[in-house]
Amino acid sequence: MTDSTWTLTLCLAALAVALLVLRRRMPVAFWWLVGYPLVALRVLITYRATMDACGLTVPASAVRRATARLVGREAAPVPPRRSLPLPTGSGLVIRLRMAAGQAPEDFIASTDRLRHAWAAHAVHIRPTKPGWLELRLIGWDVLADVRPPRRWRKGAGPLSLPLALRDDGHWHVRDFRTVPHELILGATQSGKSVYLRNLLCGLARQPVVLVGIDCKWGVELAPFASRLSALADTPDRANELLDVLLEEMEARFRLIGLRSGAGPDTVLTSDVWGLPEKVRPVPIVVVVDEVAELFLAASRDDEKRRDAMVTKLIRIAQLGRAAGIYLEVCGQRFGSELGKGATMLRAQLTNRVCHRVNDESSANMALADISPEAAVAATSIPAERPGVAIVGDSSGGWSRARSPHLTLDEAAAICRATSALAPELPRLDAFRPAAAVEPADVSSSAATMPTARPVTE
């Protein structure tokens, strides 16, 4: 081989290695440089044949058939009209104009065949308006390495948080004002705690009252004590805290009623968000970790307390949205066998996030009323992919999603840094958690209770 041939071979080998490294380390850059041009070219060349093979074409019109007969040919089936493939950060998008007689379900049923035909990681079909579809092709596994969004859209409003990246490349946004209450399920090591950390850290950066109920002696929520306005770590304390929250909710409803009857020129409202900002109460987010602990009862007195707590939670779930009080209910499992009120509480928790669970009944309890396919997908999440969850809501839509990894130390540091944002709510002062003890001081002050954190204006 000549020197020029050796040089060309080495250059090609170096280029191949560089592309492999780029694909592994920077998949977005690899997609824009290599993936998108190749896939777009493949889609454009094979579009008609692929649509015909998938049964997504319609017979040609009478005029086209007559014209074809004049030249001695047979008119080929007509595929849906399409736009040019437009690139996105994780794939490409094509707008399709359905032909007469076609329905979105025809295309949704063929997504797996389209994925294999175009060598894509996934294909998602979404109706946009009557007669039009959006075909979104995903170039690689976007859930393999999820990182927090570098920026979030301006004007998103309070209580709106991007918590998990969906498999179609969009972010799952937790908007409390749109969907007030949520149920989060997941077995041990399923990634449920990581999702909750992202939620708490996102809320910690906003002027929101955070209330925790953790009947496992506070082991899950104690690291975030510096940002919590109230924490109940036993069933008795949880029962008392729920009483205080109901008192706060009633006071807010009285405020709304007084404002509505203030005069003929007053703008009427039925929730706290319609009140003027200077008199509007701060929103409250109640995080219940391991809800099954609230349902467990070992004696008759425990049963009375359980029934009382469940009734109070249901009242908050039914009426809390208008008062600016929102529920985040977490658990390893959730089923009707927990006891009276479990199904009624579940019905009020509109948003559902189900990580890997140990039993099928928990997946059905979370997702079966949204979509049977979603419940089946939740039971097939592999154990080696912690953080992957099925996210669904009452509209019937669902998708796979994964939260960015966030360690407990990082989450606790964010809560300590944002402790000054904790609003003052006098009713909750009796439940304010003590200041967290630094890890280095735990051994020397294990028997000493830390002093309470002062309220910051």
Image (tube, rainbow, N blue to C red):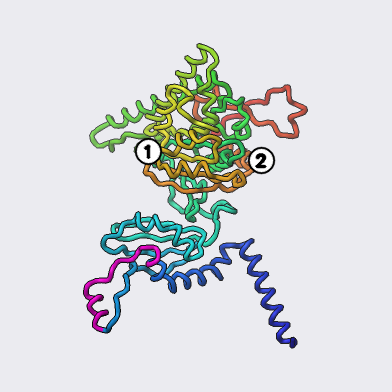
Disc 2 residue type? Answer: Asp
Which picture quadrant has residue 433? top right
Question: In the structure shown, which secondary structural element does the residue marked by tag 1 occupy?
Answer: helix
Label 1 neighbour load within 10 Å: few <14, some 14-19, many 20+:
some
Residue at 63% in and 34% down = 223
Which span is picked out in magenta? 52-70
Up-down relation of residue 174 to residue 349 (above or below): below
Residue 283 at x, y percent in the picture: 45, 35
> Is 20 left, or right, of 177 in this rendering?
right
Q: From the image, tell me which residue sits under label 2.
A: 409
Q: From the image, tell me which residue sits under label 1.
A: 273
Residue at 65% in and 72% down = 16
The CA span between labels 1 and 2 is 34 Å
Disc 1 residue type? Answer: Trp
Is residue 247 something that shows in the picture?
no
Q: Pick whichever of labels 1 and 2 is earlier in the sequence.
A: 1
* Nearer the observer, 365 or 271: 365
Is residue 293 something that shows in the picture?
yes
Residue at 40% in and 25% down = 315
Up-down relation of residue 354 to residue 58 (above or below): above
